[in-house]
Amino acid sequence: MLGRFIKGQSEQRVPQTVPGPAVPNGAVPAPAMEAETQSDDFLSLKVDLHRHLIDRFNLTALENASKDEILNEIRPIVREFVRGRNVPLNSRELDQLTSDTADEMLGLGPIEPLLKDDSIADILINTHNHVFIERRGVLEETSIRFRDEAHLLRVVNKIVSNIGRRVDESSPMVDARLDDGSRVNIAVRPISVDGPLVSIRKFSRNPYSLERLMAFNSIRQPMIDLLRIAVQARKSILVSGGTGSGKTTLLNALSSYIPARER
């Protein structure tokens, strides 16, 4: 039943978009979606689609909807959006895009694609208008935006409610963790005068080993040998450094040398 979550009839028209380049006859078809998921162009498409959907939908009503209900609502809108952009997707890819978008609407909104990108180490939300990421030590601003401050606060409350916490004027700063172990720090008004601030240090699915760090010229073999002996001999080791300098990465790598019989 299309329209259950739509905010108003006046918003049900797909906005005019600039069509992408047409695919000429005989051109090689676009690669499968799995190969494009991490590409900047495809991420940009998903960001634009998500922004278009949150502008049209009643976000409060969506919070109580199941994924199947959201899929039924957004499927025709996604198809119309992709057609308006002249994006060459086959039926399977279109279904995957629709499913991914539903996951984002049920998850942490516009930043859900960033959480799934293993190349991103940090996500920094400076109010609803500015989202930064750190990738391979380089900080860059993304095109991702939340609709307004209320939209960002909805995502913030979803994060803290999962761990039984709350964040408001009486408790304006909170530390939390996502389901995957990523660390989150949140600050809201009156501490953050311009709006909510969120930093997410992502949990690495593939922790670095010291040997892998050596391949990146971050450490040398004699240093690896010394650290391995120090860990196995149960010596105290002090690890210090600035934000993003690799403290957690080094500790994760050192932990692989802890004997299995230890606690």
Image (cartoon, helix red, strand yellow):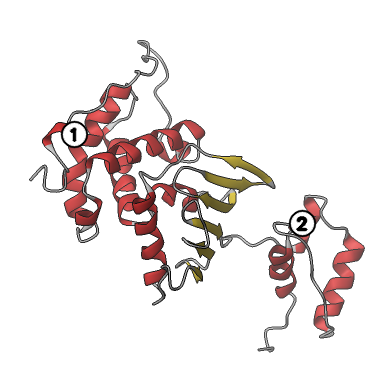
Q: Residue furthest left?
A: 1
Query: Quadrant of residue 88 in the image?
Result: top left
Q: Residue at x 58, y 49 (%)?
A: 120
Q: Which mark is residue 96?
A: none
Q: Nearer the viewer, residue 204 or 14?
A: 14
Upstream in the sequence, badge 2 or badge 1? 1
Secondary structure at numbered mark 1: helix
Q: Helix or strand or loop: what does disc 2 sit on?
A: helix
Looking at the image, residue 215 lies above or below residue 262: above
User: Where is 107 relative to 13, above or below?
Assistant: below
Left of 205 or right of it: where is 225?
right
The percent position of residue 78, horizontal first and vertical second, equals 25, 35
Q: Look at 22% across and 54% down and name the residue there.
A: 62
Where, by quadrant of the figure, is residue 97 drawn? top left
Q: Residue 89's quadrant in the figure?
A: top left
x and y percentages locating residue 58 in the rendered image: 21, 49
Q: Residue at x 26, y 26 (%)?
A: 15
Q: Nearer the viewer, residue 123 or 214?
A: 123
Label 1 CA crowd tier, 10 Å (few <14, some 14–19, many 20+)? few
Residue 103: percent from left, percent from top = 32, 52
Q: Is residue 143 visible?
A: yes
Instruction: Indicate whether 140 appears above or below 211.
Output: above
Residue 95 can be seen in this image: no
Q: Is residue 45 left or right of residue 64?
A: right
Residue designated by label 2: 213
Name the residue tied to disc 1.
11
Q: Residues within 10 Å of mark 2 (few under 14, many from 20)?
A: some
